[in-house]
Amino acid sequence: MLAAASAAAAEDGIWLDVIRKMDEVYNDLLQYEVSLEEKNAALEDSQQFISSVLTSMSDLLIVCNRAGLIESVNLALASLLGVDEQLLHGRPIFDLFADDDSRQNAGRLLVEQIGQSVADGEFLLKAANGGAIPVSLNCTPRYSGVGKLLGLVITGRPVGELKRAYQALRKAHEDLKTTKHQLIHSEKMASLGRLVAGVAHELNNPISFVYGNAIALKRYAERFGRYMSAIHGGATREECSALREELRIDRMLKDLPSLIDGTLEGAERTRDIVDALKRFSATDRDERQECDLHEIIERAVNWVQKGIANQFLVEIRFDGTLRTLGSSGQLQQVVMNLVQNAADATEGVPERSLEISGRALDGEAVIEFHDNGPGIPTANLGKLFEPFFSTKPVGRGTGLGLAISYGIVERHGGTLTVENHPSGGGLFRLSLPLATG
């Protein structure tokens, strides 16, 4: 009896283990089924995503195997050719091309250059109506997860679209260049506008001098006329001598050289001022001439100082002659912006000053502009050369001066940097390649 009971108990334990294992297997099957459904849903989402991307692509897409048979195309290609994309599957890729040259080039891609990328190859595709469509195609090899070459992925677009895109890009580039030159010229005019008072004063002095001398010469001409009329009218020697004394002919003859020289000097000074104005305001876009940086700086400082009401001392120190290759008008604009910036930065300082030093260093002309103003806030140091950034009140600046100066210096192969000087004030450092030869 005991043996039978023991055997029955053992048999019950075995069945319990079997039932427990079946429950575990069933639970595992349920988990596997849930996981499989989740993966299947993710796969469907991925397929829908890929299908929507391929359908939405405006570029042409062809996927073929190593044998050159088409495995997939997108709607853009089918629409371009005017055929059903399903009818293209399984056909040789050579059937897509309209002429022998295109087929031969495609053959080289599939046979000779298999495994290599090809960019912007031009082909003619055959449309359903028999026409030829020029396209630009890019070819990239396609590999499996283990690195085995499976075939090619070919993308492209009609050449007409590319040409229109290139034309639009070229036009945008030309418009950008035009706008850039207009901004530079506008900033020049803004600089001249700020200096009008100084320019007027600069012109007034020689013009007034010429005008005064012209009046004196006119009066002298009238007296000489009277004297010559008396001589040719038959007046006696005594009458001519008395008239000569009365009209002060001898004194006028002594004054004539100085009057003429002074008039010429005033006219030449006026001509130089006008010439400087013309050179500064001219749109010399591509001018590249050897120019003396010391002369440019002196001229720029003179222009700026004429337009400043309060005292502004500028000291220029150069170690030798520094010459560079470029546009003197544009470089003068850069220097004028830097000097004007220093003048604005030192407003309110009792003794406003700017030190300009120049030296040659490693094949470059290095020119530093150090003012005695309060310095530049650290938050603004990285923004000074950004277009339209300005700390001046509205109406006092365009916010383009330093940005345009930065661009001009870059086009001249140089650099323009800014920092605060250890002893106080702002420090702009202009570096330009030295002229060789």
Image (cartoon, helix red, strand yellow):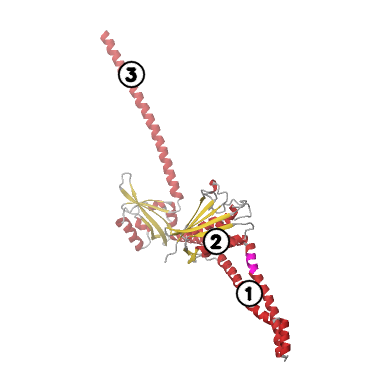
The residue segment tinted magenta is 199-205
Against 90, residue 7 (above or below) is above
Identified by mark 2, the residue type is Gln
Which one is in front, 379 or 357?
A: 357
Question: How far apart are labels 2 and 3 at the CA level?
Answer: 98 Å
Disc 1 to disc 2, C-alpha distance: 31 Å
Residue 254 percent coordinates (x, y)? 65, 79
On screen, 13 above or below 174? above
- Is 308 magenta? The answer is no
Q: Quadrant of residue 28?
A: top left
Q: Is residue 192 left or right of residue 140?
A: right
Label ID, residue 40 = none
Q: Which mark, residue 263?
A: 1
At 31% from the left and 54% from the top, the residue drawn is: 114
Q: Secondary structure at mark 1?
A: helix
Q: Which residue is mark 2?
A: 333
CA–CA distance between discs 1 and 3? Answer: 129 Å
Q: Which three-letter amino acid code belongs to the residue tagged 1?
A: Thr
